[in-house]
């Protein structure tokens, strides 16, 4: 009897039939839960055509917004849901679409996931167009440029989610791919002269230059630093001679000269700007 008790006590769990039955039940439950969740999310995103129709009217149809909705409100309403849906999409794929799992091999769940990702891509495109309409009126700032970059990263993340499912890769592969994309984006952004781009865009699309944007915010333009000097010169020429603006511009010129004089702060971008400033003819604008 003691030997029988010992054999029963040390019997491995996988030798028991109930172990496999319970594991099979858990697998079936997980598969059914994943399928139900995917169906719910797909229906919730695809069974709301009114939002898509409104976006098509206002964004692609060039129809004016209602009087009680500004471009700022319209852009914010598109940006905030984009953050939520991006997190939900990533979390759902990581949890439900495990490599080799029943959900990943299902002929029902995979098309629904593709449909859901496609809906999110449309949301990203709509958010980018909303932000573009907003920028056309209120011009560019650092945060609006960052919003554009964030939306592009969200779109790339959705593409990587589809690639992960199609190529049957692991969740670690998806995380590494997103980290590589983020690193490459940061590296590219470090090479871009955003201050000059923002200043040039704001002057070119301002009301003084005949654009659809608002009047030039000279305080913000001057806060961008010496790299905005070419655009500042254009803005002063459009607005007319103003001694206060010319004085503040001269301070930026002195700051630029000090930065290029020291080899510790020397840079190719500053060197090019200094050459352009030295080539300008002397006038009342340039001092």
Image (cartoon, helix red, strand yellow):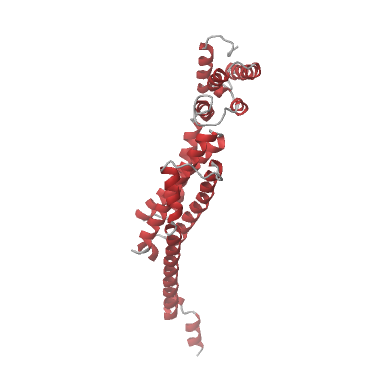
Q: Quadrant of residue 214 in the image?
A: top right
**Residue 101 visible (yes or no):** no
Q: Residue 208 appears at what percent x and percent y? A: 54, 24
Q: Above or below — where is 282 with respect to 265?
A: above
List the single residue furthest toward the top: 282
Q: Residue 274 appears at what percent x and percent y? A: 54, 16
Is 160 positioned to the left or the right of 6 in the image?
left
Residue visible at 47% across and 59% down? Answer: 92
Residue visible at 50% across and 19% down? Answer: 272
Q: Quadrant of residue 116 in the image?
A: bottom left
Q: Residue 108 appears at what percent x and percent y? A: 35, 64
Q: Residue 282 appears at what percent x and percent y? A: 56, 9
Q: Quadrant of residue 222 in the image?
A: top right
**Residue 130 visible (yes or no):** yes
Q: Above or below — where is 3 with respect to 215?
A: below
Q: Quadrant of the C terminus?
A: top right
Is 110 positioned to the left or the right of 193 in the image?
left
């Amino acid at each position: 009897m003691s030997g029988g008790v010992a054999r029963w006590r040390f019997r491995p769990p996988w030798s028991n039939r109930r172990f496999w039955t319970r594991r099979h039940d858990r697998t079936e439950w997980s598969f059914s839960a994943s399928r139900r969740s995917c169906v719910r999310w797909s229906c919730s995103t695809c069974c709301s055509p009114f939002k898509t129709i409104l976006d098509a009217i206002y964004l692609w149809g060039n129809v004016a917004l209602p009087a009680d909705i500004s471009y700022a409100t319209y852009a914010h309403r598109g940006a905030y849901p984009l953050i939520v849906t991006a997190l939900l999409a990533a979390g759902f794929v990581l949890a439900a679409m495990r490599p080799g799992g029943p959900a990943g091999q299902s002929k029902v769940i995979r098309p629904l996931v593709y449909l859901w990702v496609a809906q999110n891509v449309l949301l990203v495109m709509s958010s980018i167009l909303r932000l573009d309409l907003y920028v056309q009126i209120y011009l560019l700032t650092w945060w609006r440029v960052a919003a554009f970059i964030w939306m592009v990263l969200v779109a790339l993340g959705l593409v990587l989610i589809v690639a992960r499912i199609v190529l049957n890769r692991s969740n670690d592969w998806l995380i590494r791919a997103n980290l590589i994309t983020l690193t490459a984006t940061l590296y590219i952004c470090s090479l871009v002269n955003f201050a000059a781009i923002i200043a040039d865009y704001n002057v070119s699309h301002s009301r003084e230059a005949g654009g659809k944007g608002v009047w030039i915010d000279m305080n913000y333009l001057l806060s961008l630093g010496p790299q905005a000097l070419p655009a500042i010169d254009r803005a002063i020429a459009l607005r007319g001679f103003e001694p206060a603006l010319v004085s503040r511009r001269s301070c930026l010129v002195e700051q630029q000269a000090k930065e290029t004089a020291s080899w510790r702060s020397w840079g190719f971008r500053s060197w090019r700007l200094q050459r352009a400033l030295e080539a300008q003819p002397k006038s009342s604008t340039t001092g």
